[in-house]
Amino acid sequence: MTDATLNAPGAKPKKTSLKTITERTKRRNASERRFKAYGIGAILIGIFFLVVLAVSIVNNGAPAFTRTVLDIELTLTQDQVDEAEGELFKTKAYEQLFIASLQGQLEESGLEVTFDPAALERIVGKTGSTIREHFKANPGDIGQPVTFELAASSRVDGYFNGRVNRETLQDSRFLQLSDLDLVDALADSGIIHGSINWNFIQGADSGVDNPGGAGIGASVVGSFFMMLVVLALSLPIGIAASIYLEEFAPQNRFTDLIEVNISNLAAVPSIVFGILGLAVFIQFMHLPQSAPVVGGLVLTLMTLPTIIISTRASLKAVPPSIRDAALGVGASKMQAVFHHVLPLAMPGILTGTIIGLAQALGETAPLLLIGMVGFVARGYPDGFVAGFTEPNSAMPAQIYTWAARADVSFYEKAWGGIIILLAFLLTMNIIAIILRRRFERRW
Amino acid sequence: MPLLWLILIVLALAVVGYILGRQRALASAGGDSRHLHSLPSYYGSNVGMKIVVPAFLLMLVWLLVQPLYISSTVSAMLPESAIREGASRGLVMAEVRRTAEGLDNAVAAGLMDDDFASNARADIADVTQRLKDAGQIVTSQITQPVLRAAQEYRVLHAWGTIAMTVGVLAVAIAGLLFGLRETRAEFRARNVVEAGIRALLIAAASIAILTTIGIVLSLVFNTIEFFRLYPASEFFTTLQWAPSFSGRGGSSDLGVLPLLWGTFYISIVALAVAVPIGLFAAIYLSEYASSRVRAFAKPMLEVLAGIPTIVYGLFALLTVGPLLMRFFGDDGLGWMQSGTAVMTAGLVMGVMLIPFVSSLSDDIINAVPQAMRDGSYGLGATKSETIKQVVLPAALPGIVGAILLAASRAIGETMIVVLGAGAAARLSLNPFEAMTTVTAKIVSQLTGDADFASPEALVAFALGMTLFVLTLGLNVFALYIVRKYREQYD
């Protein structure tokens, strides 16, 4: 396209044909191909990041759902119990019984290993007291075979999922290299094996020193109550505001002011909403700190602009002929909107609301400011009303708390938490897509 | 839950009012609804509305005003001597409130009887001990004036609750009677109800304005409070960020500049990642890709935007940080001290922003009229030459707007920098060093142990104000550019 400048006056025009490819055409074609390759490259990089993200989430998070347990079947006779209860160190005596039984099981499977009680304690913790407590609580089990499922320590757990290996393990009071021989033997005989960690899915957060016992269940409940508040407030308010702006608002300053505010609020960083929640709901109105109801209020204010924008789009998509027909048969404007336009726009509104809720579900920063940090999720709320007012955490805040802890064993929990969070988000988005596919009407 | 009961009673009254209003309207028309002005249900709704709206309005106003009134009354009761050296009236009031709550809970738990809790001459040591037994948090030894104030607080609070219940119920019943009295066949119930609904719709739409006002007020008041304790000139000029957690102010250096530098540096790295990738992706998707590729690749990229930021934060901390350490850490080039650095947070934030840049630019490139492309092809230009010399210059203002919007996102992003960028505030050019941002410090100052009235905590509001002004300014500017550009072709 710059031929004119190349053929300067005086220069002899070269004879070219469209069929021969000149040097310059080659260069231009090469640059064309390069440019296209950059575009493909950019898209591949984007998808590559997505894949890396997905792989690292699944790889790192999957171990959180399993745990290593030691299965042992134990039959204690009344005599043995009496004898053990008669001794000075009662739990020690039970431990001896446990070891005897374990050795028996090992020999059955043809393996002979010698081990000391200290090694066993490093692997599964204090067995004696667990067994004693069980038989004290259930005296009927004496004389019958009882299967104990004991959770292995987090380092043994790490040995099976690759976090700990023989090369890097340093002897400590938590685990020694020699213990791993025993662990291998127990694993070969099937006494130590993996099982699903239900405690992670159902349980509550544990202390900083007990990564094995940490669960996300309580904060899932916290998130659930928060989402109930968000849904109960943002859906009616969002619909009401959109109906006003789309159907009734006159063209004036006040309407303009509302519109400008909505579009600006959509771009305010989420942490500023956290500051708002802290200052207004907690400092000024003295609502309980860390309560899901406060979290829900903050997230409602945050998601309202998103919901209003999508709701207005759905209302706008309903053709004016519907309104005109309703008005024509004598409905008032209010009746036309509420009886005809709103039901037709409902699938679109619900889709937008679910997507807004999914956004709110993953939001972390404002929750940290109003005190919904992970370690308050120590148990389930007792009752429905308490679910809103008792201190609790939410899934993303719980994940953040785990990620910020010093013990690396919690990282695995954080990744696992992310899998659960993304599973919820995915479900919500799929529901939204199905809603749109099934009920959307093209006019 | 007396408040919940009150709400339920008012709602039940409204249901009764609805039924009565409907019946009365039908009766006044002789049982034939054709003689009514509106549908019978409108008469019922009118009565229900007359009950619910004034009652709930009164309740709302009461709930807002009562704490303020009680606080000011009780606060005026506190003698000057009750305020310890270095403490403010607000802190003593917080103690009074805590003590009053403690007394309430102790009475509820049955550890004290009501007479004892309101006995002004009670032995202070005994009260403190009993409160501790009840598991109530009592910060310091309760003094006589504080105890007196707390007891007064309880009395006022109890009276206030009773008065509110009576008042709200009275208003609800008055509304019921009034609504029933005006229910006649010729009464224009529909118009009244529709006006009420319209007012409700306006109120819902105004929540956006209220939210903005709430944000601005909460930021402004606390920022003024902060600048009273810490000079504004130092906040904006000091090159140090070193809050002390032990003392109450004085020894802290709270300069915003290192934080702003960290914020901008990380945002620049993020944009350096997101803009080229996002822009090329948008160009490819809108100009080259077949519809099948587009249908696959566009949603894939947009998934990146739907992932919560906490996931990106964890990705930065646990995957990208260690990966960068392997190449730039002590084993590799030796530039990096720890996994958390400007580069870590910037890279991950860049990934997060890719779909943001690409979908906005995509829309803008698609808005360039086809005639301009055709003109360029007609002159013999290749596709890439057309894009570079015709489409992009035409779309430039819109793309700049998209980049500014992405920048405002980057500045306001919190979780990635909290987890990925480190906690040390420093002014440095090395992108492999840990730095911190405005948002990260807001989180750390407000979630720490610092006293709420201390400059160390209040500084978070000044930082929030800075952030709010910055992002809002960028947004308004970006939207202005985008709007102005759109007008050219429409």
Image: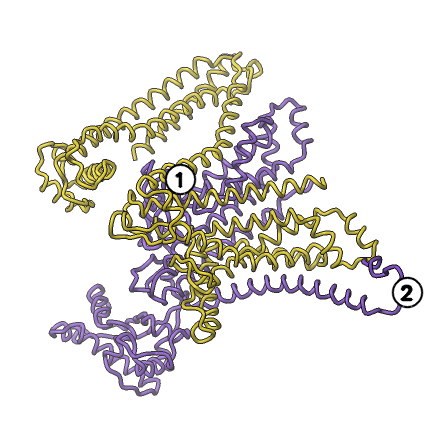
Chain colours: A purple, B yellow
Given residues A178 and B256, the one toward you in this image is: B256
Q: Residues within 10 Å of mark 2 (few under 14, many from 20)?
A: few
Give the secondary structure at mark 2. loop
The answer to whether residue A161 is left or right of residue B275 is left
Q: Could you tell me if the residues under marks 2 and 1 are in contact, i.e. CB atoms within 8 Å?
A: no
Could you say where residue A144 lies in the image, as x and y percent from the top left? 26, 72
Q: Nearer the viewer, residue A258 or A218?
A: A258
The answer to whether residue A149 shows anywhere in this view is no
What secondary structure is found at the residue carrying circle 1?
helix
Tag 1 residue: B219
Is any part of residue B273 visible from this angle?
yes
**Is the residue B158 above or below the residue B222 in the image?**
above
Could you tell me residue A314's position as x and y percent?
A: 61, 39
Q: Nearer the viewer, residue A105 or B362?
A: B362
From what the image shows, is residue A156 above or below residue B120?
Answer: below
What's under tag 1, amino acid-wise?
A: Leu
Q: Is residue B21 left or right of residue B66?
A: right
Q: Nearer the viewer, mark 2 or mark 1?
A: 2
For the N terminus of chain A, which image quadrant? bottom right
Q: Which residue is mark 2?
A: A12
Disc 1: host chain: B
The answer to whether residue A202 is left or right of residue A134 is right
